[in-house]
Image (cartoon, rainbow, N blue to C red):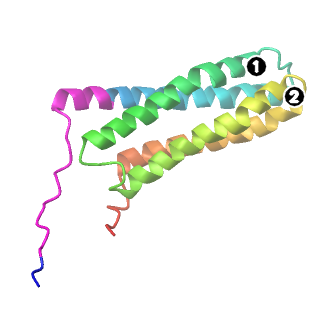
Amino acid sequence: MTRTVDRRVAAPPRRLARRPRAALRIAHVVLAIGWTGLAAVMLVLPAAVLLQGSDAGFAIPTMALVGGGVIPFFAVGTVLTGAALGIGTPWGLFRYRWVVVKTVLALAVIAGSVTLNSGWIDAAATDPSLLWPLLLSSVLHQVMLVSASVLSVEKPWGRLRRG
């Protein structure tokens, strides 16, 4: 009985050329900074209303506009450019722990925004006490987004093990 050995070598990871990679990285960083800044707006608006005890008349529509119309563009753009960078660079999508954690954080912020904040913003128009959960979720989102930025800079934990 003859045994055959598969001698195929795994293809090297695809790499983007220098200029497209730089353009994609710049787009990713700008979108991520924008997303983090917009998340800060979502933190400051309910905080201002709650701390000053003022009317939420301006804050609620502004939060609805920012949270429902502007943030999704930046969030999806950040995730898509990050995925493209992962595919087009040696970092990959599932090679390094920091990339996986960063992706999970981004997706968790998106899921939290969609499931929690959108309903709370609409309900806060009639019940201002719902500004507290909005404030707390905005703090959590800010921590998660800043953590993702730190992971991008520090790149801790090394590679994932191959099975």
Residue 77 placement: quadrant: top left
Image coordinates of residue 67 in percent, x first then y, are 65, 25
Q: Is residue 10 magenta?
A: yes
* In the foreground, 83 or 156: 83
User: Helix, strand, or loop for circle 1?
Assistant: helix
Q: Position of residue 58 (x, y in %)?
A: 77, 14
Q: Which residues are magenta?
A: 4-25
Query: Distance between the Cα atoms at labels 2 and 1?
Result: 11 Å
Callout 2 amino acid: Pro
Predominant SS of the magenta segment: loop
With respect to residue 3, does 99 lie above or below? above
Residue that numbered label 1 is attached to: 59
Q: Are marks 2 and 1 in contact (CB under 8 Å)?
A: no
How crowded pointer 2 is (Cα within 10 Å; few <14, some 14-19, many 20+) is rated as some
- Residue that appears at 75% across and 16% down: 61
**Where 147 falls versus 62 (above or below)?**
below
Q: Residues within 10 Å of mark 1 (few under 14, many from 20)?
A: many
Front in this rendered view, residue 117 or 162: 162
Q: Tell me if I can see residue 138 in this picture.
A: no
Q: Is any atom of residue 61 visible in this view?
A: yes
Quick check: 91 above or below 127?
A: below
Kindly identify which numbered label has been placed on residue 128.
2
The image quarter containing residue 21 is top left
**x, y percent for residue 90:** 24, 48
- Which residue corresponds to the image point at 72% horizontal and 25% vertical from the top-left? 45
Q: Amino acid at mark 1?
A: Ala
User: Quick one: quadrant of the C terminus?
Assistant: bottom left
Name the side, left or right, on which 138 lies relative to 107: right
Relative to 137, 88 lies left or right: left
Q: Residue at x 76, y 19 (%)?
A: 59
Q: Nearer the viewer, residue 24 or 1?
A: 1
